[in-house]
Image: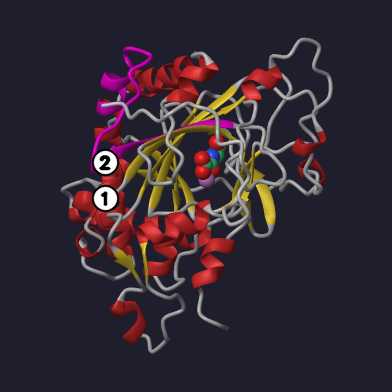
């Protein structure tokens, strides 16, 4: 089940025609555990220091969607919740999901399983990692080690869960926990995507069928943010939007996620036993810009290890995503985004430094 990749050192002969072999960087975990670390290497220093940008003091709470009402057989409850879901997608692009039916013990178990994975020896984690964005297991640091000019204070592991299930062999409980967790989370995500489809005035199953969600991509993307001695200089993850349709995120009750809302960064406090959901670039494309994927970032702190587990849900890798024809023709506005295969978009995003919504900008039609 686990994939293995050769661990040998890269060729020492530099080639004139090929890009240099990928760097293998020290993980942030190893760096943060260096004895007496009181500053950070300059490659981790972001020029725009995150804490100097205004953080909103808004009292406006992030929207909450009660999942049990979305799945309700009572038509009024369901249609009211779909209206709220549409408003949450339009106004924030982010919302909490409560009463989702995924047991709290499963959420805690997957966080612990990922924590144990990060505790494994570095060579073991590197040893199971593929190199390409479409490899089913990737472990690494920053966002894309081979192109990042400034490094993120973050290690990660990304594991494909669907359409094919993959899992590392260690820690021993990982496979069972991940299998159960990803199955349950996928059911929740698919139901929310049906609700989003309806909220756009499309058939309930429009997104599901057009983008072949039966074979849709689902990953576990676990992030480790070790304590940082100079958190005001570093970034866990710089501002970005997510690829795909819908990401469901949980975290170990240590805050750090900030969402851009009305031009300011808003701290999102962890709420136990709920998911933080956000819509991805492919909902923006499909909705022809009616719903926008929203910039978010992760800041770090100097006290606690933060772990977050994002589970992105996307179209099938071969699905071509373009604005829904009903949303283009009916309202008489032209398609604002070009059509692109989901898998090509992933390659596009992975090939550059994580930089705001630059990948989406590349397929937006000239304005
Ligand atoms: C991500 C992400 C935020 C966080 O993994 O795409 O935005 O809080 N993570 O870790
Ligand atoms: Ni993200």
- Residue 88 appears in the figure: no
Q: Is residue 177 magenta?
A: yes
Above or below 338: residue 149: above
Residue beneath the point at 26% across and 48% down: 190
Q: Position of residue 270 (x, y in %)?
A: 54, 31
Residue that label 1 marks: 216
Q: Which mark is residue 162?
A: 2
Instruction: Give the quadrant of residue 203.
Output: bottom left
- Of 102 and 365, the residue lying toward us: 365
- Of 26 and 48, the residue lying toward us: 26
Q: Position of residue 131 (x, y in %)?
A: 46, 40
Secondary structure beneath label 1: loop
Q: Quadrant of the C terminus?
A: bottom right
Q: Position of residue 322 (x, y in %)?
A: 35, 72
* Disc 2 from disc 1: Cα separation: 7 Å
**Does residue 355 appear left or right of residue 322 in this picture?**
right
Residue beneath the point at 67% across and 33% down: 153
**Does residue 15 appear left or right of residue 46 in this picture?**
left
Report the magenta residues as a range: 155-179
Q: Are marks 2 and 1 in contact (CB under 8 Å)?
A: yes
Above or below 213: residue 136: above
Protein image colouring: secondary structure
Instruction: Give the quadrant of residue 173.
Output: top left
Which numbered disc, 2 or 1, marks the residue that appears first in the sequence? 2
Q: Position of residue 339 (x, y in %)?
A: 38, 73
Instruction: Give the quadrant of residue 346.
Output: bottom left
Neighbour class for label 2 at 10 Å: few (<14), some, many (≥20)? Answer: many
């Amino acid at each position: 089940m686990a994939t293995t990749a050769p661990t040998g050192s890269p060729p020492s002969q530099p080639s004139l025609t090929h890009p240099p072999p990928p760097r293998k960087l020290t993980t942030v975990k190893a760096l943060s555990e260096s004895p007496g670390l009181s500053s950070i290497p300059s490659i981790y220093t972001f020029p725009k220091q995150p804490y100097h940008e205004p953080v909103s003091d808004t009292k406006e709470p992030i929207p909450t969607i009660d999942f049990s009402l979305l799945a309700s057989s009572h038509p009024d409850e369901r249609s009211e919740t779909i209206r709220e879901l549409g408003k949450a997608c339009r106004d924030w692009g982010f919302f909490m999901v409560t009463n989702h039916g995924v047991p709290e013990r499963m959420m805690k178990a997957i966080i612990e399983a990922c924590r144990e994975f990060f505790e494994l020896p570095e060579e073991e984690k590197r040893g199971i990692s593929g190199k390409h964005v479409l490899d089913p297991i990737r472990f690494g640091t920053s966002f894309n080690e081979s192109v990042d000019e400034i490094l993120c204070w973050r290690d990660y592991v990304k594991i494909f869960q669907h359409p094919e299930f993959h899992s590392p062999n260690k820690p021993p409980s990982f496979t069972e926990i991940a299998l159960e967790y990803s199955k349950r989370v996928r059911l929740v995500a698919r139901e929310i995507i049906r609700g989003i489809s309806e909220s756009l005035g499309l058939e309930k199953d429009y997104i599901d069928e057009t983008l072949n969600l039966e074979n849709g991509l689902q990953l576990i993307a676990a992030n480790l943010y070790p304590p940082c001695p100079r958190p005001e200089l570093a970034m866990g993850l710089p501002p970005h939007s997510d690829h795909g349709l819908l990401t469901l995120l949980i975290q170990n009750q240590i805050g750090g996620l900030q969402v851009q809302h009305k031009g300011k960064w808003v701290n999102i406090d962890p709420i136990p036993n709920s998911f933080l959901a956000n819509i991805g670039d492919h909902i923006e494309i499909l909705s022809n810009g009616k719903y926008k994927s929203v910039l978010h970032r992760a800041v770090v702190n100097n006290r606690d290890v933060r772990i977050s587990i994002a589970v992105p849900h996307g179209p099938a890798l071969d699905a071509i995503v373009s604005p829904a024809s009903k949303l283009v023709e009916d309202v008489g506005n032209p398609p604002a985004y070009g059509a692109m295969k989901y898998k090509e978009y992933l390659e596009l995003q992975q090939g550059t430094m994580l930089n705001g919504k630059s990948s989406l900008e590349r397929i937006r039609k000239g304005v």
